Structure formats: C-alpha cells, structure tokens
Image: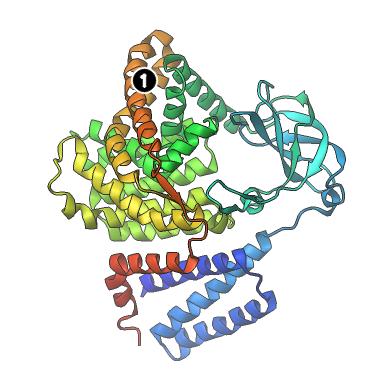
Amino acid sequence: MQDRVFYSSCFGFISGVFLRSFALLDIYLVAFLGVIFLFLLLFFYFIAPNKLGVVISVFILTFSFGVFYFHSADVSAPEFFESQVGGSVEVNGLIVDEIDTRENNQRLTVLVQAEQDTKVLVSVNLGEDFKYGDSVRIEGVLNKPENFITDQGKEFDYINYLRKDGIFYLINYPDVTIVSRGQGSKIKSTLFYIKGKFLEKISFAIRDPESLLMGGLILGERSSFGQGLRQDFVDTGTIHIVALSGYNVTIIAEWFMKLFSFLSINTAIGMGVFAIIIFVTMAGGSSTAIRAGAMAILALIARATGRNYDVARALVLVGVIMILINPFILFFDVSFQLSFIATVAVIFFAPRIEKYFYWITKKGQLRDIISVTCACYVFVLPFILYKMGNLSVVALPANILILPFIPFTMGLGFLTGFLGLIWYGLSVPVGYVSYLLLHYELAVVSYFADFSFASFSFPNFPLWITILIYAYFAYILFGRNIKNFFTGMT
C-alpha cells in the first residue's frame, strides 16, 4: 500500500505541474477539488477504509498541489521593465551564471537590480573579458524574446525556454562597463574557474575542431560549435554525445567502475559515484550537470546491481525533487526531458532487448554498448520527432561506429585535462591519442552527414501519436506492475 500511495502522490503532482504548464486552469476550482478529495482521503482512510479510494484521493490531492505549485512559480514579467520594452535603458546588474560563448558572440545572464529584480540575457561580442560575478553597468535597447522557426520547420518556444531560467528580456550588443569583479558565490566562481582551466588544458593538447568535440563529450560544451558541425551531428542522430545527459555521465562512471572491477561491487560503484561528482565539479556545478549526475547515479546502481524496481522509485523521486526545485523544466527543458527518457531506456529497455544482440561479441563491452545505443535511440525517437521534427535514417550505423570508442575517448579526455593541470608536457602524448580517436569520430559524422538522405524533417509530428507510442512503451515495460498496482485495492 505504501508503494501505491508513493506512486500516486508522485504522478499526481507531476500531472498537475504538467497540465498547468500549458493550460490555464481555474485556480479556485482546483482548490475546491483539492479540499473535497482531502476530506475523501480522511473518509476512506479512517471511517470507511478503501484502498482504491485512498489512492485516487491522494492522486487528485497531489494533482491539485502540482497545479498550485506551478501557478505560484509562474510569476509575470515586472511592470517596471515592461513599460521600457523597445526603448533605451541604463541598468546595473550582476552576472549570475557562466559565460555562454557561442560561435559569433557571448551571452551573459545578468540579474538586473532595479525596483523589481529580474534576469536579462545580454549578447556581447567575442573577445570581451567578462566573468561570473562581475558587477556591470549596461546601456542598450531592452527587448523581449520571440519564438522562431527552426531549420526543421518547428516553432521553437524561445520565450518559455528562457522563462524557465527566470529570463524575461534581451539586450543585444549594448555598452557594458565592468564596475567590479568577484561579487558572486565563491563556490560557483571556483567551479567555473576549474572548468575553464580544464578546457583550456585540453585545447592546448588537442587542436580544433577535435578539442571542441572533446569538450562536448565530457562536459557538454557544444555552444562554440560552428553551425555546420552542429547540423552534421543533428543530421546523423549523434548530437546526444555532445549533450550534457545522464547517459554520457553514466559512460564516465562505468569507465571508472571497470578500472576498479577487481574490488568489491560496492567499492566499484563508489568509484563510479566519485567519478560523477568529479564530472559535476568539472562542469561547473550547473543545474543541468547536477540533473545529469543524479540520473547517471541511478542508472549506474541499477545496471550494477540489477535492482531496477528499487531504482524505479528513486528515479521518480529524483524527478519530483527536480520539478520541485524548478517546475518549468518538466515541460520546457528539453535537456531534462531527454535525460529522463534516456535514463528510463538504459535502466528498463536495454535489458529487454539485449537478447536480440547475443550474436555480437561481449569483448570491449561491444554488445552492451550496441544494445544500450539501440534502446536509447528507439526510446527517444518519438520525442525527438515531436519536439525537434528531425528523423535521422543514418543514426544507428553512425552511432554503432562511434559509440564503442566513446568511453575510451572520454577517459583519455579527462586524463588529458588532469595531466595538463599538472604540466603541459604530460598531457601531450595522451592528447595525441585522444586526437586520433576524435578525428575518427568526426570523420564518421562527416561521412554520414554527406548523404542527401541522411535526415528528414517532420515539422508537424502529432502529439497524440507521440503519447500513444509512449503509452505502448509503458505497457511493454510496466504493464505487469501497473496491473499489480490496481490488483487487490477494491
């Protein structure tokens, strides 16, 4: 019964947040519904015990709470700034996040201190020396973000993409003056400094564009990729290898586990978790890195111990905690969505389809890599079609040719960075081997991307088909558990 209450409360809360993310609901009606089912919960628990009544009441009650929770977090843009949109402003602020360096510019997340504090995304030219924690004075034109159409013909919800991080406004290429430095968190400053030095040492030992790929593999750093290279990764269905996801972090952790496989399983898992902590540190301790790390730890424990049922509860709980921290990520953060879906695929779907790959050798973990690759690709494909409108027909062969080398490449990348922090000369030999592997991986991507039929666009892939597909996946993976969930409650 405890499990039933746990799952009904978690999924009730998630459902409430999800529905409120895209639909305006009458908050008074939701409150009335919550009060009714609170009394029904007390009735079914104390007066006329009924397990089904308790579970349904808990679901509706937590659903109402989810709606309220998102509603309370859904703050509107400050009126003080709304009146100045389209006009020139002069404001003071603090850079509160890592500098996002792109191919043609830098983007600063600035907390503007005025009548009502708010975040503004400021675009500046490359070469200007800004750091997290800088106090700045900005003079420029204040604008609001607008949605745009992607190359695949999908409308990208840029407004809510920024809104999930509390950003309501843009200022493009203003005059920015640094007033003072070192005003941010000392912990975050240290983490960003370590990350910057780590990437710097890698770039010393490995030349571009291979060093950019290495940064993407181990830290999710793909913002400085050229548009052409980025599109090649999208067209070949390999963009996930340079995204900050639970799957990538799991690879790092498993590599550490294999190094210590001669020790007890608990010690090996401990070393894997230690690798994840190192990764999160090297990634600057960003919220995306922490989410990816949490997902990776769950996948690691499940695959190492085989205790998928226990990890399933932990996975749901971690998801709820992340949504409690920021309810906008459930509907508006593609990174969180892909990490969660991929983690489900690694934990539950990969073991189901591994039997179809017994003809592949286990040497070098090749069978495991290919089965996990196929599981992740099949599982995330409906979501990618709906969200991004892109279908890569060369994704499987491209991934199969690349992924067996990724764990070794990532391991060498970490070693290159660490040795570079000690002395440049130590990192050169390891960096050269890394370069050869990275060069091969880029060559595979380039080869498949050159095919005219490499990918197709589906700008209007229906949401209802996506829901049906995932309902079918849920039935395959959890049908028996769902049936047992409702058995014996009446």
Q: Residue furthest front?
A: 452
For residue 81, above or below residue 188:
below
Q: Which of the two residues, 280 or 211, is positioned nearer the viewer here? A: 211
Q: Report how many numbered discs are placed on residues in the image.
A: 1
Residue 462 percent location from the top left of the image: 49, 65
The disc labelled 1 sits on which kind of residue?
A: Tyr
Label 1 sits on residue: 435
Q: In which quarter of the image is residue 245?
A: top left
Residue 485 percent location from the top left of the image: 33, 75
Residue 115 percent location from the top left of the image: 85, 47
Q: In which quarter of the image is residue 205?
A: top left
For residue 402, above or below residue 65:
above
Q: In which quarter of the image is the N terminus?
A: bottom left
For residue 289, above or below residue 388:
above
Q: Which residue is drawn at 38% across and 25% down?
A: 414
Residue 287 seen by the camera: yes
Q: Which of the two residues, 42 or 262, is positioned nearer the viewer here? A: 262
Q: Which residue is drawn at 62% across and 53% down?
A: 157
The chosen color scheme is: rainbow
In the image, is 143 to the left or to the right of 479? right
Mark 1 lies on a secondary structure that is: helix
Q: Callout 1: few (<14), some (14-19), or many (20+) C-alpha neighbours within 10 Å?
A: many
In the image, is 144 to the left or to the right of 285? right
In the image, is 76 to the left or to the right of 106? right
Q: Residue at x 75, y 36 (%)?
A: 172
Q: Which residue lies furthest to the top in this view?
A: 425
Residue 63 percent location from the top left of the image: 54, 72
Q: Which of the two residues, 470 or 407, is positioned nearer the viewer here? A: 470
In the image, is 306 to the left or to the right of 345? left
Residue 221 seen by the camera: no
Q: Which residue is drawn at 59% across and 29% down?
A: 103
Q: Which of the two residues, 405 or 315, is positioned nearer the viewer here? A: 405
